Every structure is written in structure tokens, then in C-alpha cells.
Amino acid sequence: MISGDLQFSLTDEISSELKRKQMSEAVLGIRPQNLSLDPIEGEDYIQGELVINEFLGERSILEIKSGETSFKVLTDPQKNIKKGDSLKIYYKKENVMIFHPETEDLI
């Protein structure tokens, strides 16, 4: 599935449901805590650039930009990365949520 200029892999179940409903548009969501800087074996990643590292003591909120799309990552404290760094952000397909664009129902 393509979101702006990002491409996300979906589970077979979600892909089948989108085809069954003949949806050409949908809203994609993934929670910040379900994104990781640490590699997840067998899972996908998206490439992005660090815009802001908001250090909160025991956590960091990273604002990442990839093309025209911005998103946040909630992670362990990150002190050794800086603005402009290129990062791989890993995710599990099972954590990608797809919503109907009009009803906002979860697909």
C-alpha cells in the first residue's frame, strides 16, 4: 500500500479485504510505539530523515520525514542521533492499520 510517497507492506488478510471491498483509497495508520529503530527480523522498514529528537528522559519522540510525509516514532532515549540523520524505521505488517476514508472504520 502506498501512503503519500511511502510504501508499506500489508498482511495478506488486509490486502484481501481491500481487494474484496474494491477500495482504491484508504487511510493508513501505525502507532508511534509500533515503529522501531532496531531491526525486526523478517520485517520491513521505511527510510526517513530525523527532523526532531525530543528527548523526554526515559523515552524519545522522533519526528521523521520521508519525502513529503512526516511521522513519529516513540523509542528508548536516543542521544547519539542528530537532525538530518538518515534512519531506517522498522515495523511489523500486523501493526499497520487501514481505515475507510469516509467512515473511518477499521478495515
Image (tube, rainbow, N blue to C red):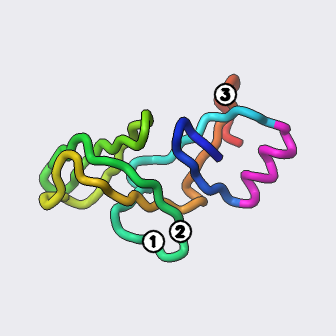
Q: Is residue 55 above or below residue 5?
A: below
Amino acid carrying mark 1 in the image? Ile
Q: Residue at x 15, y 48 (%)?
A: 55
Q: Residue at x 14, y 61 (%)?
A: 80
Tag 1–tag 2 contact (CB < 8 Å): yes
Q: What is the secondary structure assignment of the residue under circle 2?
A: loop
Spatial separation of the CA atoms under disc 1 and disc 3:
30 Å
The residue where tag 1 is placed is: 40
**Horizontal and vertical percent for residue 99?**
65, 37
The residue where tag 3 is placed is: 101
The answer to which of marks 1 and 3 sits earlier in the sequence is: 1
77 with respect to 86 (left or right): left
Amino acid carrying mark 3 in the image? Pro
Q: Is residue 36 magenta?
A: no
Amino acid carrying mark 2 in the image? Glu
The residue where tag 2 is placed is: 43
Magenta region: which residues?
12-22
Spatial separation of the CA atoms under disc 1 and disc 2:
6 Å
Q: State the predominant SS element of the stretch in magenta.
A: helix
**Horizontal and vertical percent for residue 86?**
30, 54
